[in-house]
Image (tube, grey):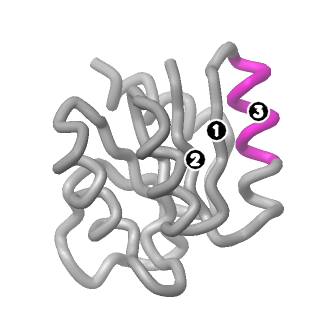
Amino acid sequence: MKILLVDDEVDILTILKRFLIHNGHDVITALGPEEARLRASAQQFDIMLTDVEMPGTKGPDLANELRARQPSLRILFMSGSEPECPLPGPLVSKPCRLDDILAALHAASL
């Protein structure tokens, strides 16, 4: 599965990327929404795993924007707090176990 991993925290990107690659996924990281837009304009992804709260564009707005360009893009959100509005995709609460992320990615890919 080709994953676009978006977060504004380098440590989270590094840990998740290493873990997901180790589990057989093709992972491209983006440090925030602007970088995610650049990555998504250059290639197609199966799923985007994104933080909800980031400076500038929030995860749900980014998801809607990228889905408008690629309707088949599946979305999985991560958040350390309860989102203020409904999300256009499932949510994994942070902190979480890495296996929970794998399970959520698998469920979102069905």
Question: Residue at left 17%, top 50%?
Answer: 68
Name the amino acid, label 3.
Phe
Three-letter code, disc 2:
Leu
The amino acid pointed to by label 1 is: Ile
- Callout 1–callout 3 Cβ contact below 8 Å: no
Part of the protein shown in magenta? 15-23
Q: Secondary structure at mark 1?
A: strand
Task: Name the image quarter holding residue 83.
Answer: bottom left
The residue that mark 3 highlights is 19
Q: Nearer the viewer, mark 1 or mark 3?
A: 1
Q: 56 or 110, which is in the foreground? A: 56
Q: CA distance from mark 2 to mark 1?
A: 6 Å
Counting residues from the N terminus, which is met first, the one under dot 2 or under dot 3? 2
Residue 7 percent location from the top left of the image: 60, 63
Which mark, residue 28? 1
Percent x, y of residue 51: 50, 64
Quarter the C terminus occupies: top left
Tell me the tag on residue 5. 2
Tell me where residue 71 appears, x and y as whole percent.
17, 37
Say if the magenta span includes residue 80: no
Q: Residues within 10 Å of mark 3 (few under 14, many from 20)?
A: some
Secondary structure mostly seen in the magenta stretch: helix
> Closest to the observer: 47 or 97?
47
Eye-nearest disc, 2 or 3: 2
* Mark nearer the N terminus (2 vs 1): 2
